Image (cartoon, rainbow, N blue to C red):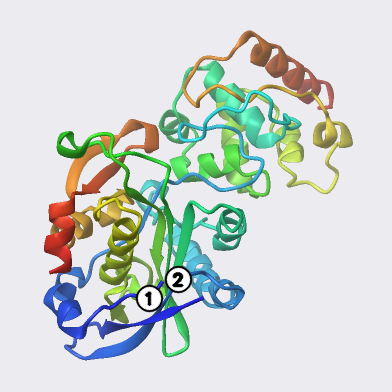
């Protein structure tokens, strides 16, 4: 696609941009296996991912009926960071954030740190637990019955593997 | 991949220099992103962390991974990518989605538009990252490209986007877009929309 952009046109308005930020974006992290969010339609037949750290946090948050903003406030984090944690399986969260989240949800930090992949001694059971769940609810909806079951199973694993 | 001749302005001067607008993001662009943008963003992040500035006031695109975004979008015909280079350096990146949203303004509600999925300029063009701005005009050129894509698709220049919170002024004042306010479905970001008439005015 070839564009015809003249210097005269450019000069007409470029001064209005001086000193301004121009970033735009939906803040949704793009990954192929990202679960449906507000802008991603649910595909009921999609292959369901194993529960990872981010999905655990999403379930815990939604159990409380909290928005990302609310969790960010409680955990002294940011909406963007938490969104990355929840939606991007490859995202590496900061240790301090994981500890804060553990405190907020009254969970053992060590287990969450392991599940987040921040500890060398990560429990294979936490890492590879193949509990599966339907990630087809939007971010702020209450948990479905199935998700409640999954969350209980995940918490059981987390608490069981913590000395 | 085609390139168009465009211009960028050396900030703080009236000197306009030739630059290139590419109608795709190439592997070379991604290499440049990784080797030049990422280290500066990481340094800026470390600096902000040390300063104690609340995270809520940090730039919201610190964690954007353009390599993943590009990989994801390459198989989707409804997504179009753009890059701007100048002096051999990567100056800006943008991704458009032609099917994501329809217009929300009452005057054009439900009509197709080009949605700006992501738009960013190089760290050295960002006052909040570098403290100074090397080049100005990435935003103006990218918005022009978005409008032209919209026109080519028969959308008459209609464009929609969610502005990162530090960028509202640019889209309102420099682009003349309508601010439809905070969008709870998009983490409270302001949603901006451009009508065909606003696009005509911007391109005039």
Q: Quadrant of the C terminus of chain B?
A: bottom left
Helix, strand or loop at disc 1? loop
Instruction: Give residue A148's mark.
Output: none
* Residue A37, x across and y down, in percent: 51, 32
Q: Nearer the viewer, mark 2 or mark 1?
A: 1
User: Horizontal placement of B76 versus A132: left or right?
Assistant: left
Q: Residue at x 48, y 54 (%)?
A: B79
Circle 2/circle 1 CB separation < 8 Å: yes
Q: Which of these two is toward me, A48 or B78?
A: B78
* Numbered disc total: 2
Helix, strand or loop at disc 2? loop
Q: Furthest residue to the top?
A: A145
Vertical side of A56 occupied by B117: above or below: below
* Residue B202, x across and y down, in percent: 16, 64
* Residue B69, x across and y down, in percent: 56, 56
**Which residue in the structure is indicated by mark 1?**
A2
**Which residue in the structure is indicated by mark 2?**
B23
Output the chain of dot 1.
Answer: A
Q: Disc 2 and disc 1: Cα gap in Å?
A: 8 Å
How crowded is the residue under tag 1: few (<14 C-alpha within 10 Å), some, or many (20+)?
Answer: some
């Amino acid at each position: 696609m070839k564009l015809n952009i003249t210097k005269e046109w450019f000069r007409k308005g470029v001064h209005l941009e001086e000193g301004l930020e121009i970033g735009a974006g939906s803040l949704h992290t793009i990954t192929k296996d990202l679960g449906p969010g507000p802008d991603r339609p649910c595909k009921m037949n999609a292959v369901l991912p194993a529960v990872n750290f981010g999905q655990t946090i999403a379930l815990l948050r939604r159990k409380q009926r909290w928005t990302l903003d609310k969790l960010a406030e409680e955990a002294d984090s940011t909406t963007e960071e938490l969104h990355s944690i929840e939606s991007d399986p490859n995202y590496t969260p900061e240790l301090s954030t994981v500890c804060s989240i553990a405190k907020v949800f009254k969970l053992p930090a060590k287990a969450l740190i392991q599940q987040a992949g921040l500890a060398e001694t990560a429990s294979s059971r936490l890492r590879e637990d193949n509990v599966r769940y339907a990630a087809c609810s939007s971010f702020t909806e209450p948990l479905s019955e199935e998700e409640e079951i999954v969350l209980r199973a995940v918490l059981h694993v987390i608490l069981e593997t913590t000395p | 991949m085609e390139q168009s001749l465009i211009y960028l302005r050396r900030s703080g001067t009236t000197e306009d220099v030739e630059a290139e607008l590419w109608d795709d993001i190439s592997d070379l662009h991604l290499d440049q992103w990784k080797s030049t943008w990422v280290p500066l963003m990481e340094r800026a992040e470390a600096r902000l962390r040390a300063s104690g500035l609340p995270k809520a006031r940090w730039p919201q695109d610190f964690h954007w991974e353009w390599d993943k975004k590009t990989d994801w979008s390459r198989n989707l015909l409804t997504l179009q990518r753009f890059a701007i280079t100048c002096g051999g350096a990567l100056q800006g990146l943008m991704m458009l989605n032609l099917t994501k949203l329809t217009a929300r303004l009452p005057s054009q509600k439900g009509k197709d538009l080009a949605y700006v999925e992501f738009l960013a300029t190089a760290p050295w063009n960002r006052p909040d990252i570098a403290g100074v701005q090397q080049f100005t005009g990435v935003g103006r050129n990218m918005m022009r490209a978005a409008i032209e894509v919209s026109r080519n698709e028969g959308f008459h220049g209609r464009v929609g986007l969610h502005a990162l919170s530090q960028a509202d002024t640019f889209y309102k004042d420099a682009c003349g877009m309508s601010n439809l306010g905070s969008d709870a479905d998009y983490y409270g970001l302001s949603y901006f929309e451009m009508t065909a008439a606003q696009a005509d005015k911007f391109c005039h």
